[in-house]
Image: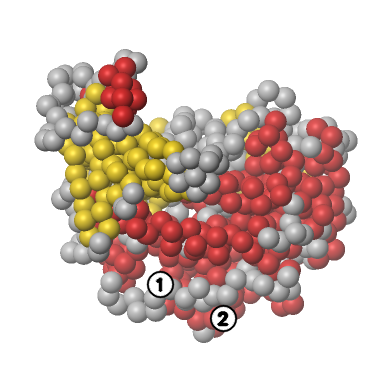
Amino acid sequence: QDSSLPVGVFIWEVENGRDEDVEVSIMFSLQNGPGAKAAGSGGHWNEPFTFHKDGQRVAGVLLHHCPPVNPFTLAISAREKAGTEVTHVIAFDPTGLGGELWQDLLQDGRLDSPPGKSRLTEKGEVTAAAVCASCRVPAHGHKTLEFALAWDMPCVHFGSKEKLHLRRYTRFFGSKGDAAPALSHYALTHYEEWERKIEAWQNPILENSQLPSWYKSALFNELYFLTDGGTIWMEVPPDCCAEDLQGPAGAGLSHLLPVLREYGRFAYLEGQPGVLVLVALPVLMLGPFCLSFCCPSYMSCFVFSAAVTVVNEDVQPRQYLICGQTAQVKMKNVVPHDTGDPGDEPWQRVNAYLMHNTADWKDLNLKFVLQVYRDYYLTRDSLYLQDMWPVCQAVMESELKFDTDNDGLIENSGFADQTYDAWAVHGASAYCGGLWLAAVCMMCKMAEVLGDTEIQQKYVDILNKGKEAFERMLWNGKYYNYDSSGSDTSSSIMSDQCAGQWFLGACGLDQGDFEVFPKGHVLSALRTIFEKNVLGFAGGTMGAVNGMRPDGKPDTSSVQSNEVWVGVVYSLAATMIQEGMVEEGFRTAEGCYRTVWERLGMAFQTPEAYREKKVYRSLAYMRPLSIWSMQLALERRAGRAPAPAQLPQDHSHP
């Protein structure tokens, strides 16, 4: 409940070091709406409010912003208590110097607090309001002044305006658009509990003297994207059916409906400002380790929503930009690239990505299977696994068509048919081939857990063939070649070549009967990557370049091969830690942190990619959330892998 609330709290600790008492006033001002352009036809207005409950009183101003679509109310407020007075101004012009407002405040440290509502704004006119909290701080004493910001936009239309969506918090505070006072009061009376819980969660890491300070900063601060990444969390109406959610094909997944109703739909943008698709599924494999680790129910929202889209198809034709190919938007039993464009109607119309026909991508189906088992591993929710099992079988059956020679290993098709969507790959490949074998291994394990012996044997046979083919076609004695094409760059050293091993290790499937990649080969590949892609690139100070030639020069065959992808580097570091290369893992990841958060000044807007000199791409991207896989690897090595966080076992009703 509390994670869904649209609130912020600002706490001012005022200390008085003087020998006499001091009068202190702090003012909080806010504009009504996002600016003159959005003021539109006018009609916006403000009004004062007070909210009293359980002996606690909050006072402030409501700023009603009333566009034709998606109206909302902002609330600025402060907590009234003994010795603290709250005053306000309901309207002033924020486009000037604010002289009238300042004079009001400076006259006596209070605002005039006129009663009643402001007038409606004219077309194009902007208005603002202010709240002031005042108190007397005793000599050598201290006081606390507490402010809150709330924003109540309960009902949302996306760009198409076809469907009305309710935000998650409306389950607890209603959908009438009058919740801002209650939200403000709730935030100001609960923030201390939130602080205690946050500190209890963070302190075991922050107080661990064996972890470097930069890592602690990166681990917690990269979580900014969960709230600043265009995040939405919507309710699923209690009376909807599967067909309402995803068309006629969705009826076969009606057993998933209770879970969607319970958790809603949670999503964020792939990146901002330029990557306006919700939940890019090839990137989702890396990002939500933090969700699976800390908030498994959020992750269920992602995966269940994705499962509903898998069975659907959209036969509308679309021309794709890179190849000029025309194909249908969505194939049945193929995982979509994304859940849609917020400028259209996400979840209803998926695959907003226009560069390639992603039905031919080799990694999407595999990453869905990997995420399903990861979340089962972290939650031990057997009903979740049963729900996902038919979908996993469907997407893997669809994937089998890419094994064109029946050797147990899929082949890439000669174009950029995976998340590296500008880096062509042909034949067997370290990246997609490794993900394939990891997914096949997890199919074996899921079948074992569920007692499906026929499917288990099917994938055991595929795995045995595929492992032999992978080693024979790609292992060169030191590392796995980029692909088996024999081209000038097929022997490039890809920093992400052990992605399959990374996921297997994170899920406890890297030993004994489930060892897919020989340990000696994995360690040799990782040492080669550390030597060439990390230490051999920018003096070892910028992380791992995606592709490096054996002669120590970056692979410049594509725009992406000589980039550093921050999220990939964090997952590479996690793989190193899993395999006992802890010092090398931290050295690798530190290069990215120092580059982004210190040298480039991109704190809280970590880019997807950068090059050695002057070039970066796609600020504020979701993939760097993968740093939480480093923490999972560290805890697993220390014997403190997270205890299964049980999701509700009764999926029969909300």
The quarter of the rendered structure image containing the N terminus is bottom left
Q: Which residue is mark 2?
A: 448
Residues 413 and 138: in front is 138
Vertical relation: 498 (above or below) 318: below
Residue at (79% x, 47% y) in the render: 587
**Residue 245 screen position, x and y as percent:** 26, 56
- Residue at the front extreme, as displayed: 19
Q: Name the secondary structure under disc 1.
A: helix
Q: Residues within 10 Å of mark 1 (few under 14, many from 20)?
A: some
Q: Is residue 491 left or right of residue 280?
A: right
Q: Is residue 608 left or right of residue 548?
A: left
**How many numbered marks have been drawn onto this rendered protein structure?**
2
Q: Which residue is mark 1?
A: 387
CA distance separating discs 1 and 2: 15 Å
Give the quadrant of residue 236: bottom left
Residue at (60% x, 33% y) in the render: 602
Residues 101 and 563: in front is 101
Q: Residues within 10 Å of mark 2 (few under 14, many from 20)?
A: some
Vertical relation: 273 (above or below) 640: above
**Residue 16 screen position, x and y as percent:** 51, 42
Residue at (45% x, 54% y) in the render: 335
Q: Name the secondary structure under disc 2.
A: helix
Kindly report which numbered mark, 1 or 2, lies closer to the viewer in this rendering: 1
Vertical relation: 99 (above or below) 645: above
Q: Is residue 574 left or right of residue 100?
A: right
Q: Amino acid at mark 2?
A: Glu
Give the quadrant of residue 3: bottom left
Instruction: Say how the picture is coloured.
Output: secondary structure
Q: Specify whether residue 556 is in view.
A: no
